[in-house]
Structures are given as structure tokens and as C-alpha cells.
Amino acid sequence: MTPIASSRETKQTAFFASFDYDIIPKKLTATVGTRHFRFSNKFVGSVGGSFGCYEQGAQPGGCPNYPTYAYSLDEQNLVDTESGWKSRANLTWHVTTDAMVYYTWSQGFRPGGFNQNGLSAHATGPDGLPQYLIPRAYSSDKLTNNELGWKTTFWNHHLQWNGAVYREDWNDVQIAFFNPGLVGNLFYNTNGQNFVVKGVETSIILQPFAGLVLQAAGSWNQSRQTNSPALVNNNPASANYGQPITQLCNTDPCTPVDNPFGPVGAPSANSPPMQMSFRARYDWGFGDSYTAYVQFGAHHQGHSYTQAGANPNYAIGGAISSSRGRFENPAYTTMEASIGVAKDNWTVTLNAENLANSTKSTFISTGQFIVAQTPLRPRVIGVSVGYTF
């Protein structure tokens, strides 16, 4: 168990400005904007724990095989300030009254923070000394986006086609580690890899005739790790200070340590390369005052990984030593349909979700040190009756 008596305090001061200028009136418009921010972070209190004991009291003979943990956050003086500018620029061209293209460059970031177990020592090296001190803090990660897009309508507004092509550079990504055998029995955050994300997305809405609407959308993304950071020995007293940690010597003989940040080319977490959806709906009327509709839809999502390359793949049948194992979420397709009738204030609807009753997992984890899967919701068929007044 790990009691925590601490508090975080974050204050932000910011101001922003944005300006539009018509280079060609009603045709070509330039937009520029910027935002200045200042974050003040503070983390105070303490963290304590005694793993292996129980609420009913200590086991007979105490808990000799389990270390106790206590971290005074106040003594670490966890106070930090970060400030800077984030900006954007946009160029919009109205080619015709029914077609517009644009280019956008923009920046973003996610604020950093502190670790509750900062400076605790782990990962014993060949010289018997710890090789790794948990970082006291982690900094913001940063995103730069370049996007070229279009918004168009055709066929007297019966057809709409929108889309965008983009590239995102995501640097100093914040990543959470939890590996008791290597870096201790508490989560901590640090800055890790850089990623490049390239993609295209598009959507189409078509109304070929009154009552029928067809919708389709899709996206393709490629995320790729572009650098190869390593877990570096940051204990000045250790023999291989400043070098990547390649072995763990808590036991004899030493065991090898794979680079937890993963290789160049690894994809980012929860990033399926392909997603698609389709929907068709037809509305009509009959009799004196009846209206009805029928609708069908389908969604496909490609495979993805629960963690970035920063964590090892889980070996089926192997021991679970970390709650941050890396799994592959399978690709899946779901379908749904519904039909409804309305008259005056009454409506009756029959709907069905997950028609094929797919049982694919949407997320897999070892958060409780067992392999747990979150499956798709099973096939659901329902009837609803409504009355408005």
C-alpha cells in the first residue's frame, strides 16, 4: 500500500492575439496568431508506503522482505516555472464560392510536472551501486503541425468533400514507466522519444436524391519514432555514469536490460494506421402522416499497440513484471442498423449494434498484474418507443 498526503498546485498566466488580413478581399486571407504562457508548478507533501504488509497489521515477524518507502516532497523543493510562446499561421484561399483550400502551421505543448519518488535510487550495477536516480521532474512535450486541407461542395450542394494532408513533429514525448524489477515499485514520468506523424483524412457526404444520404470517412496515419534515446546511468557515484544502462545486477549473475525507449521506427501508442466509416440513411413518408427511416453503418479500425516502443512486447506465458506491458490491439469492424417509424408525437425504433457480434479487444493491459482485455460491446438489439409533448 502507498499512502499519499500531497498536493499539486499549477497556476497559468497567458495572453494571446490573432490577426486576419485579406490579401485579396473575399478570396485570399492570411491569419497569424500567438500565445504567451507562463506555468508555475508546485508539489508539496509526502509519500510513504510499506509493500507486503496488510491493513490487519504486519505479518508474523514483520515484513523483512519488503522495503519501506518514504519521500518528503517538501525537502525536494519541487517548484518550477516554464514560459514561452506558441504560435499559428493560416492561409485560406476561396477558389470559388463552393471550394476552399487552406494551409495551417501551428504549435502546441503539454505542461511538465514532478515525480513523487524523485531521486530514489534503483538498478544496481556491476559495481554494486545504483545506476539510476528517478528524475525529480519532467518537462513539457512539444508538437508542430503542418496541414494542407480543402472544403468543397459540388452538384448544387448535393455532394460535400472535405479532407486534409498533414505532418506532425512530436518531440520530447512524456512517457510513464513502471517496472518494479528495474526502476522501483512506483510510476514515474520522464521525457522520451520523438515521433513524426504523417497522415491524410477525408470525408464525403452525398445526397443523390431526396431522402437518401450517404456518408463515408477515412484516415490513414503513419507514426514513426525518429530518435533512439536510452535509459542512461545518472548516478555520478556509479562506475558507468553517463552510459546507457545495459545490465541489472540485483542478483548474481547480472541480467541484460533492453532499451526501454524502443528502436527507431517504432509506432506511437494507440495509433491505428487506418480508420474508416460508412453510413447510409433513407427517410420517406407514407400514408396520411407517417414518416419512416432505415439506416445502416459500418466502422473499421486497424491494429494498434497499447504502448509506444518504450515497453517490451509481452511474451505469452511469461511472467508479468510490469503493468506497462506492450500489446497489439487487433483490427476490428463493427456494423449497426436501425429502422424507425413516427406519427404525430409517437416514434418506434428498432436498432441493432455490433451486428456480427465481434469480440475483438479494444484495449489490453497488465494494470493489475494480470492480462486484462476490454472487448467490444456484444451485439445489442433493442426497441424504443417515444412520445413527445
Image (cartoon, helix red, strand yellow):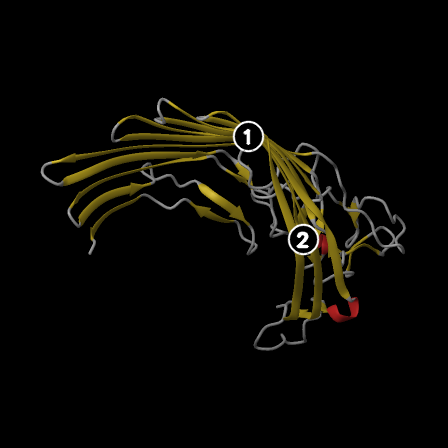
Residue hosting label 2: 111
Callout 1: SS: loop
**Amino acid beneath label 1:** Pro
The reply to whether dot 1 and dot 2 touch (C-beta < 8 Å) is: no
Q: Residues within 10 Å of mark 2 (few under 14, many from 20)?
A: some
**Location of residue 281 in the rendering, given as x and y in whole percent from the top left corner:** 29, 33
Q: Residue at x 43, y 40 (%)?
A: 360
Most foreground residue, 323 or 35: 35
For marks 1 and 2, the one nearer the N-term is 1
* Disc number lying in front (1 or 2): 1
187 over 35 or under it: above or below: below
Q: Is residue 122 above or below residue 89?
A: below
Classed neighbour count for the residue bearing mark 1: other residues with Cα under 10 Å, few (<14), some (14–19), many (≥20) = few
Residue 25, quarter of picture: top right
Q: Label 1, label 2: how many angstroms apart (C-alpha)?
A: 39 Å
Q: Is residue 159 in view from this perspective?
A: yes
| Residue found at the very far front of the displayed protein | 25
- The part of the image, by quadrant, that contains residue 106 is top right
Position above or below: 346 against 89: below
- Residue that label 1 marks: 25
| Quadrant, the C terminus | bottom left
Q: Nearer the viewer, residue 256 or 218?
A: 218
Residue visible at 76% across and 56% down? 135
Q: Quadrant of the N terminus?
A: bottom right
| Horizontal side, residue 333 vs residue 45: left or right | left
Amino acid type shown at disc 2 = Pro
Q: Is residue 171 left or right of residue 337?
A: right
